[in-house]
Image (spheres, rainbow, N blue to C red):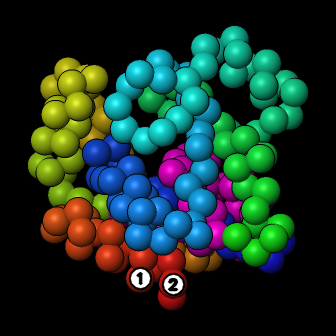
Amino acid sequence: MTGHLFLVVGASGVGKDTLLAGAKAADPTLHWARRVITRPSTDAGEPFEGVTPPEFQQRLAADEFALHWQAHGLSYGVPKREVASLSEGGTVLVNGSRGALTAALTAFPDLTVIRISAPSDVLAERLAARGRETRAEITARLDRASYELPEGTRVVDIRNTGTPAQGVAQLLQALRA
């Protein structure tokens, strides 16, 4: 593998999709891997392929995913075709999960983790604005959020508390470092 894989992680509502979209717009050579998720494709946020749980399981059984994990009652997968450009020197960005990090490091030992954080009150406001969860569900989600990563992981930390443009600038700087 001659390219570089960046796994972007952080609590829900921290701004991963916004920063990834901004980075991709600023640098079209970046590839933002399109995930497969067991939720309706009509949900807002990142561009993804929505599938049913049985469809996801069929694709998992067919070994279509380079990475896959469960989080918040949903299944997530990164199709192998989405990371294929790594063999040609491409830079691939994956909106990932801390829960999938061990498997990701096994599959891609040279990956770099970009950990995005924001204060809990900011996260709660952003999650509430989505309208997908109740306040109690949001509180529970934030209570179980962890920023612990396996020892030895290459990590770049970004605190997303400013404007989207400032966050995108930080992400682009991290990708170029």
In the rendered image, the vertical position of residue 142 relative to residue 162, given as above or below:
above
The answer to if 105 sits in the magenta stretch is yes
Residue 67 showing in the rendered view: no
Amino acid at pointer 2 = Arg
Magenta span: 91-116
90 or 56: which is nearer to us?
Answer: 90
Quadrant of the rendered image containing residue 51:
top right
Residue 68 showing in the rendered view: yes
Position of 145 with respect to 175 (left or right) is left
Residue at the (57%, 77%) spot, across then down: 154
158 or 177: which is nearer to us?
Answer: 177
What residue did someone put label 2 on? 176
What residue did someone put label 1 on? 173
What secondary structure is found at the residue carrying circle 1? Answer: helix
Residue at the (33%, 53%) spot, across then down: 18
The answer to if 75 sits in the magenta stretch is no
In the rendered image, the vertical position of residue 35 relative to residue 43, given as above or below:
below
Position of 162 with respect to 78 (left or right) is left
68 or 49: which is nearer to us?
Answer: 49
Q: Position of residue 145 (x, y in %)?
A: 35, 46
